[in-house]
Amino acid sequence: MNRIAFLILLFPFISMAQLKPIVKDSVDVKYVFVKGDSLAKEAIDLDEVILMNKLKFENKDEHIQYLILKRKTLKVYRYAKMAADTLTKYNSDLKLLTKKREQRRYSKRMQRFIEDEFSEELKKLTRTEGQILVKLIHRQTGITTYNLIKDLRSGWKAFWYNNTAKLFDISLKAEFDPRTSKEDFFIEDILQRAFQDQYLEKQKPALEFNYYDLVDAWNAKNKLGVKQ
């Protein structure tokens, strides 16, 4: 009996001795599996997703105008994106050239490239599509089309282009501002929805606006009956 009692008392200590201690690493790493590969990280980095509610239009006519604007915006956005890419390359390449003669030669080559690349396509745009493009170029580059031409060509050329564009009711000096222009707000809304649906390839713009702030601002203006 004494032996049995002793074994009963000793059993908990024997059981504890048989358990292997669990050694925890100082860094607790979770693995995420992507296409069969394991990544040592706690989460996958995802692009920002904007939750977008259905827009409220003042009337049927405004809704129709939005749909027309959508078709034209989706059509010309790629030209604005190309302009921004070209300008970025132009500026970066120009910095590598130290001699003014080399800079002038490169500028002329870039001018010919822009004219060959854009001129025929831009001639096919309607007046409203051209004006939307002018605004989108300002959104993507932070520079008005007028100043882009002025920098690439000359002040006189920019002046001539602007006055020619005025004949078609297009201002090359037009800026993109969705805070004050309802049409520009609609354009921003159209772009954000197209990016979310992956219909358009998103390019980081030079001018960024908080979409939710824009929605709140325009909802407040509509409640006050402010027309833009």
Image: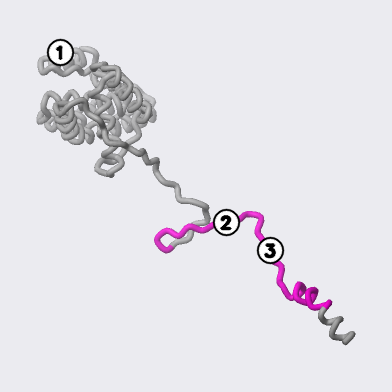
Q: Circle 2 sits on which residue?
A: 29
Percent across and percent down for residue 213 are 37, 26
* Residue 178 lies in quadrant: top left
**Whether label 2 touches label 1, CB < 8 Å:** no
Q: Magenta region: which residues?
A: 9-36
Q: Is residue 74 above or below residue 142?
A: below
Q: Which is more toward the observer, 193 or 57?
A: 57
* Label 3, residues with CA under 10 Å away: few <14, some 14-19, many ≥20: few
Q: Secondary structure at mark 2?
A: loop
Q: Is residue 31 magenta?
A: yes
Q: Is residue 40 above or below residue 149?
A: below
Residue 51's label in the rendered image is: none
Work out which quarter of the rendered image holds the C terminus and state it. top left
- Residue 101 can be seen, yes or no: no
* Label 1, residues with CA under 10 Å away: few <14, some 14-19, many ≥20: some
Q: Is residue 119 magenta?
A: no
Residue sitting at the far front: 1
Under mark 2, the amino acid is Val
Percent across and percent down for residue 188 are 28, 30
Q: Earlier in the sequence, mark 1 or mark 3?
A: 3
Percent across and percent down for residue 158 are 21, 16
**Whether label 1 touches label 3, CB < 8 Å:** no
> Residue at coordinates 28% horizontally, 44% vertically from top-left?
198
> Residue at coordinates 29% horizontally, 31% vertically from top-left?
84
**Mark 1 to mark 3 CA distance (whole Å):** 77 Å
* Label 2, residues with CA under 10 Å away: few <14, some 14-19, many ≥20: few
Q: Circle 3 sits on which residue?
A: 23
Under mark 1, the amino acid is Asn
Work out which quarter of the rendered image holds the N terminus and state it. bottom right
Under mark 3, the amino acid is Val
Q: Circle 1 sits on which residue?
A: 163
- Residue 174 can be seen, yes or no: yes
